[in-house]
């Protein structure tokens, strides 16, 4: 595995060297982890002229799921609560003889940027931009394996919940139970705050659970995800509680399911991001739900739950193979509720069987 991280750093070095920059300072935690195998709290990564250095503000975390830094990196530990790792790393870059340093301006605060500039005034600071994020878009098979295991854990947790009695329990209680089950099945923790929405709340994107109790006849929409070895996946399903679904519920569910299927079937190497969004959006738009649609149909996942690419109307770019994305259309009708269906898939060429579905819990409209 050490070779994997060395290759990632080498690719980044080629990028900023081609732009005329001698060294790079990576401060965004997910990017540090991607390049260094671990991102202890407060750590930054210097990709320098002579060597690469992981600079930590205090001893590295000792939590097993956080992983250990790549053994090929030099570890530079600052005394606890003494100094900023980014400032120290800039000083190390200057000591190595670098005359320029690429920094992640989208992550550094203005104050921190000024502190980095002041410690080594002869260093030209240049914006690294989203170079690391772009490297992260296409996953290797080890990364996909972590996502696959995370999806299995999320499926297990959701499946167990569906076998329990739901009527009378609160959204908040159900969300907490799901998160406990994720950990019980081996997750590092939830990939994001679990959303459980009932009745008029159902189908709302990013709904925060409340003390509303589940009632018979409700739509129940659930969105959860597991983190496994740092990688985050996502699944969303909608059910009806305690009785056969009403006609309007069946009609709305079938419509969202058709939109989700259209988006999934459009996933292929070379497909434009906006075209995947359009495939799902047109199904709902043609049924008169244009005003109720979310701003995007899906997004990339990985070390963060919301990564590039964005499957949205104005998104630029095309999908590559081995890119994991969500496809998650939904419709929320104020005062009535709604439907969300959300899967994590990996883009694969048709010769390899097409998109790989990681989240396999049934999408049949179940009455629980």
Image (spheres, rainbow, N blue to C red):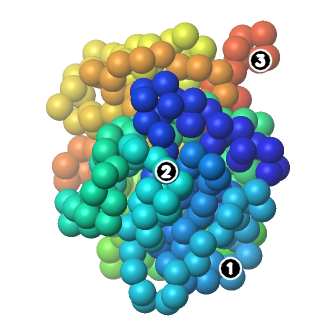
Q: Earlier in the sequence, mark 3 or mark 1?
A: 1
Q: Is residue 59 above or below residue 266?
A: below
Real-space Cα separation, disc 2 to disc 3, in angstroms: 51 Å
- Label 1 neighbourhood size at 10 Å, few (<14), some (14-19), many (20+)? few
Residue 305 in the figure: left or right of residue 277? right
* Number of numbered discs: 3
What is the x, y in percent for residue 16? Answer: 47, 33
Q: Which residue is mark 1?
A: 63
Q: Which residue is mark 2?
A: 97
What is the x, y in percent for residue 223? Answer: 48, 55
Looking at the rendered structure, the secondary structure element under dot 2 is loop
Looking at the rendered structure, the secondary structure element under dot 3 is loop
Q: Earlier in the sequence, mark 2 or mark 1?
A: 1
Real-space Cα separation, disc 2 to disc 1, in angstroms: 35 Å
Residue 126 in the figure: left or right of residue 158? left
Mark 2–mark 3 contact, CB under 8 Å? Answer: no
Q: Which residue is mark 3?
A: 353
Q: Which mark identifies residue 86? A: none
From the image, state whether disc 2 or disc 1 is nearer to you: 2
What is the x, y in percent for residue 210? Answer: 32, 74
Could you say which is closer to the camera, residue 356 or residue 120? 120
**Residue at (27% x, 35% y) in the render:** 295
Could you say which is closer to the camera, residue 298 or residue 174? 298
């Amino acid at each position: 595995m050490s070779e994997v991280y060395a290759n990632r750093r080498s690719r980044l070095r080629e990028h900023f060297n081609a732009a005329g920059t001698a060294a790079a300072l990576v401060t965004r935690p997910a990017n540090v982890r991607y390049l260094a195998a671990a991102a202890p709290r407060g750590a930054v990564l210097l990709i320098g002229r002579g060597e690469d250095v992981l600079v930590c503000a205090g001893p590295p975390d000792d939590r097993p799921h956080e992983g250990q830094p790549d053994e090929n990196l030099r570890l530079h530990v600052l005394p606890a609560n003494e100094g900023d790792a980014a400032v120290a790393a800039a000083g190390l870059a200057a000591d190595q003889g670098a005359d320029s340093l690429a920094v992640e301006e989208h992550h550094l605060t203005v104050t921190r940027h000024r502190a980095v500039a002041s410690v080594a005034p002869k260093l030209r600071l240049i914006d690294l931009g989203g170079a690391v994020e772009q490297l992260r878009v296409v996953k290797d098979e080890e990364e996909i394996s972590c996502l696959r295991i995370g999806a299995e854990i999320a499926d297990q947790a959701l499946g167990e919940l569906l076998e329990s009695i739901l009527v009378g329990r609160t959204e908040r209680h159900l969300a907490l139970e799901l998160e406990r089950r994720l950990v019980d099945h081996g997750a590092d923790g939830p990939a994001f705050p679990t959303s459980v929405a009932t009745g008029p709340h159902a189908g709302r994107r990013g709904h925060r659970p409340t003390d509303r109790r589940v009632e018979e006849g409700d739509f129940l929409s659930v969105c959860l995800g597991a983190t496994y070895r740092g990688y985050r996946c996502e699944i969303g399903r909608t059910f009806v509680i305690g009785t056969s679904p009403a006609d309007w519920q069946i009609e709305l569910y079938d419509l969202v399911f058709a939109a989700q299927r259209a988006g999934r079937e459009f996933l292929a190497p070379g497909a434009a991001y906006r075209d995947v969004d359009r495939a799902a959006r047109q199904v709902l738009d043609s049924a008169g739900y244009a005003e109720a649609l979310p701003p995007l149909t899906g997004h990339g996942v990985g070390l963060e739950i919301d990564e590039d690419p964005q499957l949205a109307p104005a998104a630029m770019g095309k999908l590559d193979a081995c890119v994991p994305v969500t496809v998650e259309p939904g419709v929320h009708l104020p005062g009535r509720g709604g439907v969300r269906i959300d899967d994590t898939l990996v883009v694969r060429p048709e010769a390899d069987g097409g998109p790989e579905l990681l989240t396999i819990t049934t999408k049949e409209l179940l009455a629980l």
